[in-house]
Image (tube, helix red, strand yellow):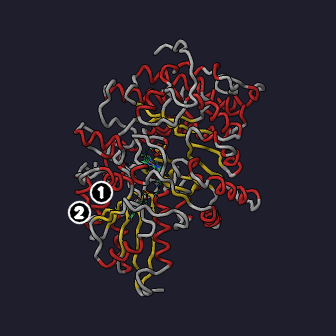
Amino acid sequence: MGSRVFRVVLIKPSHYDQDGYVIQWWRSTLPSNSLASVYGLVEECARDRVLGPDVDIEIEACDECNSIVDAKAIAKRIRAGGGGMVGLIGVQSNQYPRALDLGRQFRALDLPVVMGGFHVSGCIAMLPKLPADLQAALDLGIHLFAGEAEGRMTQLLREVAAGTAPPIYNFINDLPEMASAVVPILPREVVTRVAGHYSSFDAGRGCPFQCSFCTIINVQGRKSRYRTPDDVEAIVRGNAAQGITRFFVTDDNFARNRNWEPILDRLIQLRERDKFNIKMLLQVDTLCHRIPGFIEKAARAGCNAVFIGLENINPESLMGTKKRQNKIWEYREMLLAWRAQKVMTYAGYILGFPTDTPQSIARDIEVIKKELPIDLLEFFYLTPLPGSEDHKKLHMAGVPMEPDMNKYDLEHACTAHARMSKEDWQQVYADAWKRYYSDAHVETIMRRAVASGINVRKILDALTIFSGSARIEGVHPLQFGFLRRKLRRQRRYGMPIVNPLLFYPWRAFDWLKVAAQWLLLIRRYRRTMARVAADPAAQRYMDEALRPVSGEREADHLVEIFADKIPKTHGAPLRARAPQPALA
Ligand code: B12
Ligand code: SF4
C-alpha cells in the first residue's frame, strides 16, 4: 500500500436524446471497447507504480450508457485519496456535447480532465484549424488527446499528476504497434452492466480501403496493425477468469486482419480443447467468403453473429463513396456461406447516397427483402462524420452542415441532399425501418432462420430489438438498452430542469406507453415464431434469397436489376439489362 492514492475515473459518455436527456439504460447492449482499452493501459501503469512507489493508482470505469455519473461524488472520492483525474473516453462526435457538459461539471469542481476518442482525433487529423467546439473544451481547461494511447499513458499520468500536462497531446501521426500492445480489459462489475455480459477487444486497427464517409482510415490509418494470437489468448483467458466468455470483436474488418487465421486457430483451440464457451460477434466485409476457410473457422471459433458492411446495393452509390470493394453480384453467395455455418447476419444500410431518391430506396429495400438472405438490416443516414473525407470536403468548401454534434449519430440528416429535401430524407429513414420490419418480412426472416438451423431464440430477440428500437424508443439499435432511464437533472447544458410536478407525470406516461408498445410487439413476434416453428414444412422452406448460387451468373436477378450501373471491373458480370421493378 502506498501512502497516497491517485484516482483515475474513466467515463465513456453517452449522448442526448431529442429532449436533451442522457440516453442511458438499466442494461446497455453493446460494450465499449475504448473504455476497455484505456482501462487496460491505466491498469498497467498502476501495476508498474509509474507515479512512484508510494502512490497507488486506483481506477474506476463507467459507461454512461448503463451507469449514472455523479460528478460531486466522484470529486469527493478523488479528493479523499489526495488527487486524481477524470478521463472522458472514446468520445465520438455525437457524444461530444455530452462529454463537454461532463467536462464542464468536473472542471467546475477543479479536477483535471482529459478527453480522447474519434471526435478529437478525427478533427485534429483532418481539419486545418481546431474547430470551435474543441476550442471550447480547451477554454474550460480540458486537455485533448489525439491519437492512440498505447505507450503514452505513463507520460500522461505523470504530467497530469505534476500539473504540467499540455492542452493538447497530438500523437495522430505516430500510430503505435499493436503486436504485444497492452490488451483491453474491464472488471466484471463493469462488463455485467451490458446485457449478455459481452466484453470486447480489437484484434487489429486500420483498414486498407478508402470509403469517403469513413473516419477510421484517417485516424487509425490505412495500414492494418494486428494483435498476436498470444495476446488474443491472454484477452480470452483474462476475461474467462472472471466468468466472461462473450466478445464483440471490434475490428472494423476482421477479414482483413492478416493474422485472422492464427487468431481463429487459437480461439478454436481454446474452445474445442480447453472448453472455453467462447461466443463472438465479428465485423467483416462483403468479400470475406472469398478467403478460403475464413467463414468456417470463424464459426468454429465461436462466431454466432456477424456484422457485414453492405452499405448499399446500388453499385452507382457504392462507387460514389469509393466503396469499390463491394460487389453486389457476390452478396448472396457471401450471405449463404454464413448461413451454412448457422451464423446470424447483420448488415448496415446507408440512406442518402447522392443518387438515392425515396423511390429508389423503397425499391432497393424490396429487392433486398426478396433476393438477399440477410437477417437483420439496420439503417443509417449518410453522414459527413468529422474525421472523414466527406466532412473535410464539405468543410473546406464551406457547405452548410448541421452545427449540433449531438446529431452526428447517423440518425439525423446533417447536410443537404441533392435529390431529397430534409423532410423527404427523414421520411425515408422512418419508412425504411417500417418497410424492412414489416410483419410479413419478419415472418420470412423467421422461416429462413428455421430452415437454416439458426438459433431461433437469438433471431427472435434480435428481431424484436431491431424492429422496436427505432420505432418505439426512438433510438438506433446500436444505442439500445433495457429499461430507459431519464434523470430529471441530467439534461443538456442550457436546457431548463423541468419542475418535478410536470416531469414525473410525463415520465410515467412515457414509460407506460413505451412498455405497452414493447409488450405488444413481443407478444406478436412470439406468436409468429411459435407458428413458424410448429409448421411441419418449416425445415424445407425455400425462397429466392435462400436459393443456392448455381455459378451461372445469368440467373442472378440482383445483377440484372443493376446491370447498367455495375462498373466494368475485373470479375464483374457483363450482362444485358433486365426490366427493373417499378419504382414505388
Ligand atoms: C466498437 C464501436 C462501436 C461500439 C462501441 C463503442 C466503443 N467506442 O467502443 C458501438 C456499437 C456501441 C458503437 C456505436 C456507434 N458508433 Co462506433 N465504432 C466502434 C468501432 C468499430 C471501434 C471502436 C474501438 O474500440 N476502437 C478502438 C479504440 C481503442 O480506439 P479509440 O476509441 O479511438 O480509443 C483510443 C484513442 O482514441 C485513445 N483514447 C480514447 N479515449 C481516450 C481518453 C483518454 C483520457 C486518453 C488519454 C486516450 C483516449 O486511446 C484509445 C486507445 O488507443 C469504431 C471504429 C474504430 N475503428 O475505432 C466505430 C466508431 C467509433 N463509431 C462511430 C459511430 C458514428 C457510431 C454510432 C454513432 C453510429 C454507428 N452506427 O456506428 C453508434 C452509436 C454510438 C452511441 N452514441 O452510443 C464512428 C465515430 C466517428 C465520429 N467522428 O464520431 C466510428 C469511428 C466508426 C465510423 N463510422 O467512422 N460503435
Ligand atoms: S467503411 Fe469499413 S471498409 Fe470502408 S474504409 Fe472504413 S473501415 Fe474500411
Q: Is residue 189 visible?
A: no
Report helix, strand or loop for mark 2.
loop
Q: Is residue 385 visible?
A: yes
Q: Amino acid at mark 2?
A: Leu
Q: Amino acid at mark 1?
A: Leu
For marks 2 and 1, give the CA distance: 9 Å
Residue holding disc 2: 140
What is the quadrant of residue 457 in the picture? Answer: top right
Q: Position of residue 59 (x, y in %)?
A: 45, 71
* Above/below status of 3 relative to 420: below
Q: Position of residue 321 (x, y in %)?
A: 41, 35
Q: Which mark is residue 33?
A: none
* Above/below status of 503 relative to 316: below
Instruction: Give the mark nearest the N terminus, 2 or 1.
Output: 1
Report helix, strand or loop for mark 1.
helix
Q: Which mark is residue 100?
A: 1
